[in-house]
Amino acid sequence: MSEHPNLAAALSAFQAEMPVVPKGKTAKVPTKSGGSYSYTYAGLADVTEAAMPLLASHGLSFSCLPRMGERGFELVGRLLHTSGESVEGALPISGNTPQEMGSSLTYMRRYLLGCITGLVTDDDDDGALASRPQRKTAASKAAASETGELASVAQVGKLNALLREAGHTTDADRYAWLSAGCRREITSSKQLTKAEASRAIDALGREATSRAVEPSASEADLLDTEGDDA
């Protein structure tokens, strides 16, 4: 039974004992040019194995559920305390196939758990993203330069404008959307290769077109009324 009277006290106690989860897995991503790049990460199983028993010992639990948000499907992560208090956050789910959506769900579950609890991942090569952003950015740029030219200034400008139009108004939201699409951690639009930026622009353009052709609420009501009269 938790001795902490509320969520804030329990989370504080958890963070005092919180482990740093090693990035024990490596992903290799092929590029259109025939090359590839790789990155290390901590798998969802490793993160939950390290975090869940400690969370439970402090009267905390974590769960995720998908829902339809204003901009499409999103995954909601919720940290709960035995007092009944809770805190939540949400990130968008991307993908056009069940496999892509499953991959996005796994990534977002891990991302949300880290965001809400403060849990970080690390290894011998680079530190936690939040604590050493310059080193991580340099590594990401190096990986991108090995596999293709970085996105142009014009691409970055257009991409950021489309992201804002799509409702991704915060840095965290934009970078989460880009990270899910690129299958690697993105902390700046300037880290993208030209090919990645082009794919993101195309995807956002299709979303904008889809929104433009959908009838407004009043138009939809009129169409339904006309159908009833017929």
Image: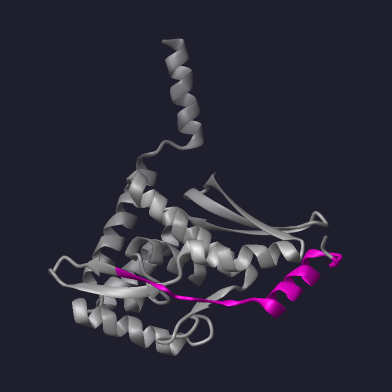
Extreme residue in the left direction: 34
The percent position of residue 189, horizontal first and vertical second, equals 36, 74
The percent position of residue 105, horizontal first and vertical second, equals 46, 53
As drawn, 14 above or below 229: below
Q: Quadrant of residue 5?
A: bottom right
Residue 148 seen in render: no
As drawn, 225 above or below 216: above
Residue found 32% across the figure and 45% down from its top: 97
Residue 91 seen in render: yes
Instruction: Give the position of the N terminus as an image quadrant.
Output: bottom right
Residue found 50% across the figure and 35% down from its top: 217
The percent position of residue 116, horizontal first and vertical second, equals 62, 66
- In the picture, measured across the screen, residue 216 lies left or right of residue 84, that is left
- In the picture, measured across the screen, residue 14 lies left or right of residue 200, that is right
Instruction: Give the position of the C terminus as an image quadrant.
Output: top left
Front residue (pair 156, 2) = 2
The percent position of residue 86, horizontal first and vertical second, equals 73, 58
The span picked out in magenta is 3-27
Q: Is residue 221 magenta?
A: no
Extreme residue in the top direction: 230
Count every numbered label the image shows and give the total. Answer: 0
Front residue (pair 174, 210) = 174
Q: Is residue 14 magenta?
A: yes
Residue found 33% across the figure and 78% down from its top: 191
- In the picture, measured across the screen, residue 1 lies left or right of residue 105, that is right
As drawn, 203 above or below 33: above
Looking at the picture, the colour scheme in use is: one colour
